[in-house]
Amino acid sequence: MPSICFVAGDPSGDAHAACLIAAIKDKLPSLVCTGLGGSAMQQAGMLLLDDLTQTASIGPFDAARHLGRFIRARRLLEDHLRTHRPDLVVLVDFGDFNLPVIAPLVHRQGIPILYYISPQIWAWGRWRLRLIRRYVRRMLVFFAFEEQFYKQQGIPVTWVGHPLVESSSVSVSVSLNKEQTLQQLGLNPWRTTVGLLPGSRLSEINRHLPLMLRAATQLTRHMPGVQFLVPKAPTVNRVELEKHLRQIKKLAVSISEIPIANALQLMQAAIVASGTATLEVAWHSVPMVVVYCTSWPTYLAARLAVRVPHIAMVNLVAGRALVPELLQHQAHPKRIARALISLLRDETQRKTQQEAFQQVRDKLGASGSVARAASVVLDMLLPAS
């Protein structure tokens, strides 16, 4: 039977890889899937060698804390490749581990490699291009500008579009009674609702949610009627969110466990941690302010390495500073609150963002991204097997 080994290492990669596994198995039920990843990939039908989603980190300094776990995972994978020898290895994002550590290991076994979801090489760490040229047969990318980038580098690449297009379209088609939903969440349907989206990793929650709550407190001093909604990511334990909420007094804030697409329909604006969430917020036309904080060693290293003018994905796709970005020391509660007040009170600024979000949506491609990716994987797999 044909077999594929997958390697993913964070909650986002785990979720995307799980959808890809399900799409491939739908076309080829006899396929055997093994690898490193997380619970989503396991539920999709993959034999999980080790769960790497617990090692999700930002930058090499944070990742160093999990060095022992990475060494063990590499050893497990090496034994697996030698004893079971899959027909194809699919690496999913996670470039700091997959490219320098896993790709050479797989290459030495003579197994072809397909890379799904490009690391942000176009933004920083371009030295990794030589690893891709040497080890990777084909890149599958989410964004058109990534396809152009790899073509210019002479690397085989296929733009499949972003899965967000399909998932958001399906979610939006579900009717939502906003007034009733807000009441169920303990919020007032007649008040302005601002979303707080701190990220999907525990480290991001701990860095961003307290900051966002302090900014929310500043905001309510100028706009007392505002209330706040924190969507819970599937990878986050509700207890972690509640721990931070208990530290803030006299703030109307609720946690939402409804699908994120539905939660976004309840918001008039949002404070969003930089990441894929900015695209999802833009897809639903919610005006936003983007923030991000990390450890100072990681931030200083990024300042030296990053080659793009923006860090928010929505700004990168738009090709301009569409939404405000407040990073590290700039992400001060008063400054965030001022940016949000301006957005809530200035209708022109709000509409300018929302009109530009339509252009961002157009650049994400058509629906069917995962099915197109599955077709490319099968094209590589069947000749190999």
Image (cartoon, grey):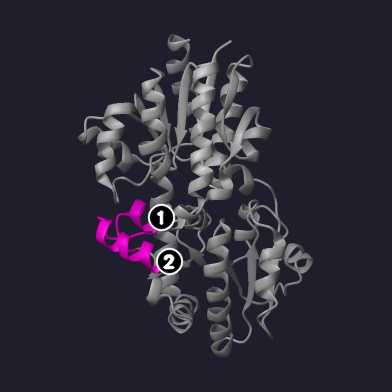
Q: Quadrant of residue 134?
A: top left
Q: Is residue 313 left or right of residue 74?
A: left
Q: Residue 318: within the magenta?
A: yes
Magenta stretch? Answer: 293-321
Q: Nearer the viewer, residue 25 or 78?
A: 78
- Name the spot of residue 297 as percent of width and height, x first: 36, 65
Q: Quadrant of residue 251?
A: bottom right
| Disc 2 secondary structure class | loop
Q: Residue at image x 45%, y 60%?
A: 274
Lower position in the chain sequence, tag 1 or tag 2: 1
User: Residue 59's mark?
Assistant: 1
Q: Position of residue 296 (x, y in %)?
A: 38, 68
Q: Point out residue 197 in the picture as x, y percentages from the top left corner.
A: 56, 64
Cβ atoms under marks 1 and 2 closer than 8 Å: yes
Looking at the rendering, which quadrant does residue 148 occupy? Answer: top left
* 338 relative to 71, above or below: below
Structural distance between the alpha carbons of marks 1 and 2? 9 Å
Q: What residue type is disc 2 on?
A: Ser
Establish if 187 lies above or below 95. below
Q: Nearer the viewer, residue 272 or 234?
A: 234
In this rendered view, identify the residue nearer to me: 355 or 96.
96
User: In the image, what residue type sits under mark 1?
Assistant: Gly
From this view, report whether residue 250 is shown above or below residue 11: below
Which disc, if any, is residue 295?
A: 2
